[in-house]
Amino acid sequence: MSKKSVKLYTDNVLEEFYNHLLDGNLDQLHIPHSDVFYVKAAVDAHYGKSFTLKHVEEAMRLEGWTEKSYSDPNYGKSKEV
């Protein structure tokens, strides 16, 4: 069975979480990785305007960022070429 993910493209993360919780469809909720929130804060401060989480996450992926987790045994290991 494949798992479908619905991307969360709003900056109202908590509100969307509770809406999905009330609707009983938490399995369809995508909350951006914490890296996205940190980068968003940095670019907002740098450029003096607010960017959406969607815009920041898409830009990060285009630049080669991938979602990784500390629970991954290979996290932080450099790739040998």
Image: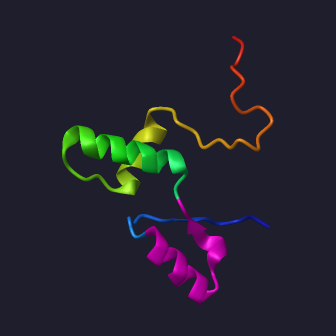
**Residue 17 in the figure: left or right of residue 24:** left
Residue 31, above or below 26: above
- Residue 26 in the figure: left or right of residue 72: left
Q: Give the range drawn in magenta.
A: 13-31
Give whichever of 2, 77 is nearer the camera: 77
In-image side of 54 versus 18 (left or right): left
Rendered image quadrant of residue 6: bottom right
Question: Which quarter of the image is occupied by the C terminus?
Answer: top right
Residue 60 position within the rendered picture, expressed as x and y whole percent measured from the top left: 44, 40
| Count of numbered badges drawn on the protein | 0
- The picture places residue 5, in percent across and down from the top left corner, at 60, 65
Q: Which residue is drawn at 48% across and 73% down?
A: 14
Could you tell me residue 37's position as x and y percent? 44, 51
Viewer-proximal residue among 3 and 9: 9
Magenta segment includes 19: yes
Q: Quadrant of the N terminus?
A: bottom right
Q: How is the image coloured?
A: rainbow
Percent across and percent down for residue 62 are 44, 37
Q: Does the magenta stretch include residue 39?
A: no
Is 1 drawn above or below residue 23 in the view shown?
Answer: above
The answer to which quarter of the image holds residue 23 is bottom right
Residue 14 vertical placement versus 49 (above, below): below
Which residue in the rendered view is the most extreme toward the bottom?
A: 22
Q: Main secondary structure of the magenta part?
A: helix
- At horizontal 45% and vertical 77% (from top left) the residue drawn is 15
The furthest residue to the left:
48
Residue at 63% across / 80% down in the picture?
25
